[in-house]
């Protein structure tokens, strides 16, 4: 009888260990982790703000100072470890989490006012006179994230200002026969903390045929070329908002846009005919008074009858393309 009791006790021992082990793993899976929770919340919020800013849903200036922001990530990783202890560890974790949230708010929304910011906004004048031998012009503009405004009415070939705390302008001016070529390129400073402002405001000549090329980062672009003799217009950009007003000063002109996730708004005069080819399966299109020719090509209703024409080609990602008439 005693042997039977001993054997029965031994047989039950593994069952107890198994129950304890299952209970242990279940307890670990249900443990609350402050660090991971709030790191996830911060990443989601910042991501949503970026998307809203790119699509114009929020008017938030994200002055991110990444060199100062990365230690906050380390803080959150530490919170994920501290938060696994008792109530004292959880209290310390909660207080540190509040401090980290305050730091994130400061870096993201008021980064340009932090003591770590070394750069300051400087206004730089830009002026290129027309060469006496020039009969046409080629202007290339390369700049980073920010805002670009371009109008007509320059006394020279091009003039304007740059207000930025992280870019300075390098100018190149050449004459080749009767073609005057100008390159305006933003040179990034070695110190780029804050990066709160970058606004390029330019005017170009309206008495010479011009080839215009724009290469930018994520930017708000307002281009009024209604009085400009724009022979060719090339835009290469990333996540941007592009507002383009085209004129009728030449018999024919071309526009090429290569963009990522962008909002592209084009205003055309009723005096020209337009044909557009869109290479994108993800773009939304609002093409007023256009007729579909094939899967990628559209023509305005007045294309055949118009003496003046513009040929447009769009190679874009997830973008919206809107064309209206004035």
Image (spheres, grey):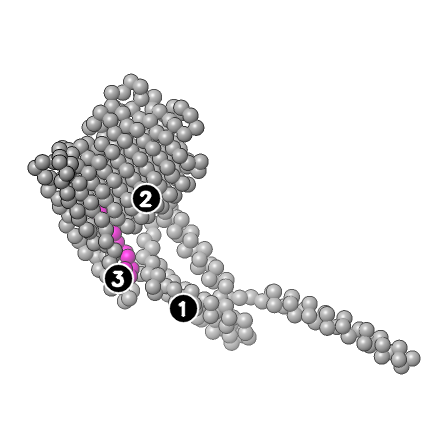
Label 2 residue SS: loop
What residue would you read off at disc 3?
Answer: 191
The image position of residue 74, as x and y in percent, is: 43, 67
SS of the residue under disc 1: helix
Q: List x then y, in percent, for residue 60.
A: 34, 52
Q: Is residue 55 above or below residue 4?
A: above
Picture layout, residue 13 above or below residue 246: below
Give above or below for 154 relative to 165: above
Residue 121 at x, y = what percent? Answer: 21, 57
- Where disc 3 sits, the SS reads loop
**Residues at marks 1 and 3 touching, judged by CB atoms closer than 8 Å:** no
Which comes sooner in the sequence, label 1 or label 3? 1
Residue segment shown in magenta: 191-201
Determine if the magenta segment contains residue 195.
yes
Q: Residue 87: which disc?
A: none
Left or right, 17 with respect to 307, comes to right
Location of the C terminus (image quadrant): top left
The residue beneath circle 2 is 237
The residue labelled by disc 1 is: 99
State which mark lies toward you, 1 or 2.
2
For image coordinates 20% across by 40% down, the residue present is 139
Q: Is residue 152 visible?
A: no
């Amino acid at each position: 009888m005693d042997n039977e009791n001993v054997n029965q006790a031994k047989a039950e021992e593994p069952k107890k260990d198994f129950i304890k082990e299952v209970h242990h793993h279940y307890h670990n899976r249900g443990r609350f982790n402050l660090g991971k929770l709030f790191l996830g919340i911060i990443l989601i919020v910042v991501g949503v703000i970026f998307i809203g800013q790119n699509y114009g849903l929020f008017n938030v200036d994200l002055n991110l100072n990444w060199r100062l922001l990365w230690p906050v990530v380390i803080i959150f990783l530490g919170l994920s470890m501290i938060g696994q202890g008792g109530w004292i560890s959880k209290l310390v974790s909660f207080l540190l989490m509040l401090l980290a949230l305050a730091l994130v708010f400061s870096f993201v929304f008021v980064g340009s006012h932090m003591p770590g910011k070394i750069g300051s906004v400087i206004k730089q004048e830009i002026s290129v006179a027309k060469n006496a031998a020039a009969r046409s012009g080629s202007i290339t503009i390369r700049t980073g994230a920010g805002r670009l405004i371009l109008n007509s009415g320059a006394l020279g070939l091009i003039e304007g200002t740059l207000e930025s705390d992280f870019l300075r302008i390098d100018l190149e001016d050449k004459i080749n026969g009767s073609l005057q070529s100008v390159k305006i390129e933003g040179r990034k400073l070695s110190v780029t903390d804050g990066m709160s402002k970058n606004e390029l405001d330019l005017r170009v000549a309206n008495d010479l045929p011009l080839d215009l090329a724009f290469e930018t980062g994520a930017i708000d672009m307002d281009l009024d070329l209604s009085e400009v003799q724009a022979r060719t217009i090339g835009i290469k950009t990333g996540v941007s908002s592009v507002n383009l007003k085209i004129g009728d000063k030449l018999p024919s002109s071309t526009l090429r846009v290569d963009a990522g996730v962008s909002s592209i708004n084009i205003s055309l005069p009723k005096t020209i005919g337009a044909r557009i080819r869109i290479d994108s399966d993800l773009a939304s299109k609002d093409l007023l008074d256009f007729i579909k020719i094939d899967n990628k090509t559209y023509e305005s209703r007045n294309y055949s009858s118009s003496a003046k024409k513009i040929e447009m080609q769009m190679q874009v990602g997830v973008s919206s393309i809107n064309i209206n008439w004035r």
